[in-house]
Image (cartoon, grey):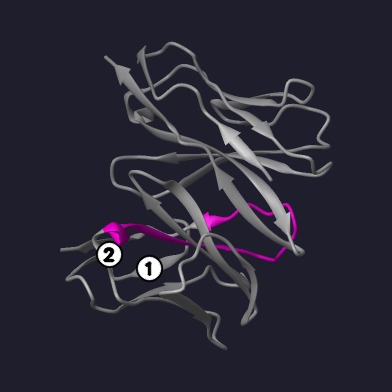
Amino acid sequence: DSGVTQTPKHLITATGQRVTLRCSPRSGDLSVYWYQQSLDQGLQFLIQYYNGEERAKGNILERFSAQQFPDLHSELNLSSLELGDSALYFCASSVASGTPNEQFFGPGTRLTVL
Amino acid sequence: AQKITQTQPGMFVQEKEAVTLDCTYDTSDPSYGLFWYKQPSSGEMIFLIYQGSYDQQNATEGRYSLNFQKARKSANLVISASQLGDSAMYFCAMRGVIQGAQKLVFGQGTRLTINP
């Protein structure tokens, strides 16, 4: 158990819908990262937040957005969903930002868009 | 830009044998970190081992060791005395720093199957 929690574990929805994925980092970790794992794209970095502020953006679509709240939990919002958004979405956390600390991954949310 | 290459899509190894999973990387940053993660069929990503670019010695964690050859830009994972529970996907990743923030760049992974 990495100490990072993600909810829900599974999510099935339809095209055009909007969903919210939630992540709670390990106690004491200030950085939260979101990754998408799909069959064709592999594991890709989406976005990072540090202590409530956006720090880095990766291959995140404009239909996707994220935020980190004062209690440090983070939410990833996916809207106007398409079939290709079906993937495993991971949240990871680390103590700081820009340091060699490893990132601890949550169990992931498996999103299926029908 | 950073890039990780894992050239072995799949590997089959007999139980108790040692196995080496290949990883090569490309970066222009003088300071970087290399990670290996294990992803069993249940889906979670499990951190295995870390090697910093300035570390003088190869990293080891139990049965895992990292064969770091900086000049060749390779960071192969060695698993000694493999066990059935080692069957999983293995990902090599590199930490890159963008705008003072770190992100991980992953390879495509190697599916390791341990045969009894």
State which quarter of the image contains the N terminus of chain A.
Answer: bottom left
Residue B102 place in picture, x, y as percent:
68, 58
Placement of A25 over or under A103, stated as above or below = below
Q: Are marks 2 and 1 in contact (CB under 8 Å)?
A: yes
Circle 1 chain: A
**Amino acid type assigned to the residue bearing label 1 in the image:** Gln
Neighbor class of circle 2 (other Cα within 10 Å; few <14, some 14-19, many 20+) is some
Residue A12 place in picture, x, y as percent:
18, 67
Would residue A95 be counted in the magenta stretch?
yes
Circle 2 chain: A
Mark drawn on residue A9: 2
Placement of B83 over or under B90, stated as above or below = above
Q: Start and end of the magenta stretch?
A: A84-104
Residue B106 place in picture, x, y as percent:
54, 43
Label 1 sits on residue: A6
**Residue at 49 percent of width and 52 percent of height:** A44
B33 and A60: which is toward the camera: A60
Placement of B84 over or under A22, stated as above or below = above
**Residue at 33 percent of width and 44 percent of height:** A39
- Residue found farthest to the bottom: A70
Q: Is mark 1 on a helix, strand or loop?
A: strand
Residue A69 place in picture, x, y as percent:
53, 86
